[in-house]
Amino acid sequence: MKMNNFAISSLFRPGKPVKSLEFFPPKTGEDTRRLFLAASRLRAFQPDFVSVTYGAGGTTRRFTQEITARLQRELKWLVMPHLTCVGSTRTELRETIQGFVNEGVRNIMTLRGDPPKGSTEFVATENGFRYASDLVAFIKKSFPEICMGVAGYPEKHPEAPSAEDDINHLKFKVDQGADFITTQLFYDNQYYYDYVAKIRAQGIKKAVLPGILPVLNADQVKRFGITLPGKLEAQLTAAGDDKTAQCEIGMDWATEQIAGLLDNGAPGVHLYIMNRSKSALGILDRLKNRGYFPDE
Ligand SMILES: Cc1cc2nc3c(=O)[nH]c(=O)nc-3n(C[C@H](O)[C@H](O)[C@H](O)COP(=O)(O)OP(=O)(O)OC[C@H]3O[C@@H](n4cnc5c(N)ncnc54)[C@H](O)[C@@H]3O)c2cc1C
């Protein structure tokens, strides 16, 4: 077996928290150069795996495959590309998945994707899929060796009529063959704890990897529609436009969140790093100083 070719689900073991990072595919040569500079610095983070998002509008899709291949080849990381149903027929999705498999990919983050900008309703492509669960079932049948991550929403997916409906849909997605869940970002751990309790009550036993984005400013969080705790908002307001202070606040808050999550049994952490290395390394340093993620 190649080093970067095993199922992510096998990483979730008691007492060995997983740390992973998320990149997005850059659009320009200069951004690609920056991404690989950040990636080379992030060797020190020693991620258990990294993931590469899938462009919403179609233009960056082939970059997901290219960046995945390069990160596997050059950094020797276990890389999980994301894949969405947006704008693709089943035949096209099969070709894309086969392309990933040909690159040695063993894990796919399996998603529906967002409706196009300006539209609130997702419309399935003709001969495509309506929900992530349809794509999960398709992959399970056609590529049974693929390990699949799926998305979960501690604050509920915005389109779901209720948290209960959303969790029922998650249950169906898992029953179709998903292997683990990565969450949308959140800044108040209580959302994660309540969410995990509810999904366990529904009989979902898969690992739920919390997604954490070190915050930079309040507007960024509001754009995502995520709750910003009052204490964090007050700290960010006090920092004003001071970028260094904002970054320190983001790293401190994320460190506290991750320490709390690990203390309360989370299987690790997935960091949304926006293709930058500084916060991830700063957070890891802080966590190591407190005894988390000791060197092996
Ligand atoms: C960890 C993570 C990574 C992401 N990566 C990307 C990325 O790389 N590229 C990208 O474009 N987007 C990405 N997204 C965003 C994601 O595509 C959107 O949140 C999208 O709106 C929903 O995708 P999903 O896979 O959760 O969809 P689904 O699981 O299909 O859910 C979508 C909505 O439909 C509802 N639903 C599901 N099944 C049913 C059913 N049978 N009947 C009725 N309603 C149902 C759900 O409750 C939910 O409200 C990511 C999100 C997360 C959390």
Image (cartoon, grey):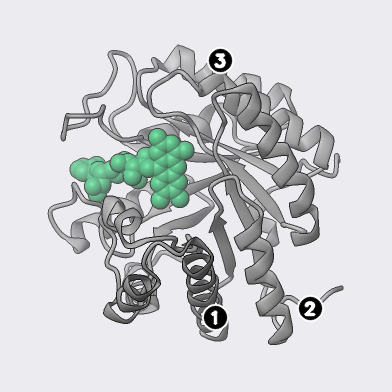
Judge by depth and name the residue closer to the eye, 287 or 137: 287
Disc 1 vs disc 3: Cβ atoms closer than 8 Å?
A: no
Q: Quadrant of residue 188?
A: bottom left
Please tell me which of labels 1 and 3 falls first in the chain: 3
Q: Secondary structure at mark 3?
A: helix
Cα distance between the residues tagged 3 and 2 = 41 Å
Q: Secondary structure at mark 1?
A: loop
Judge by depth and name the residue closer to the eye, 252 or 12: 252
Q: Residue placed at 72% from the left, 57% from the top?
A: 48
Amino acid type of the residue tagged 3 in the rendering: Glu
Q: Which residue is mark 2?
A: 294
Left or right: 145 as drawn, with respect to 57: right
Q: Nearer the viewer, mark 1 or mark 2?
A: 2
Q: Which residue is mark 1?
A: 265
Please tell me whether residue 166 is drawn above or below residue 191 in the rendered image.
above
Please tell me whether residue 220 is drawn above or below residue 106 in the rendered image.
below
| Image quarter of the N terminus | top right
Amino acid type of the residue tagged 2 in the rendering: Pro
Please tell me which of labels 1 and 2 falls first in the chain: 1
For label 1, the crowd category at 10 Å Cα-Cα, with few meaning under 14, some 14 to 19 and many 20 or more, is few
Please tell me which of labels 3 and 2 falls first in the chain: 3
Cα distance between the residues tagged 1 and 2 = 17 Å
Badge number at residue 95:
3
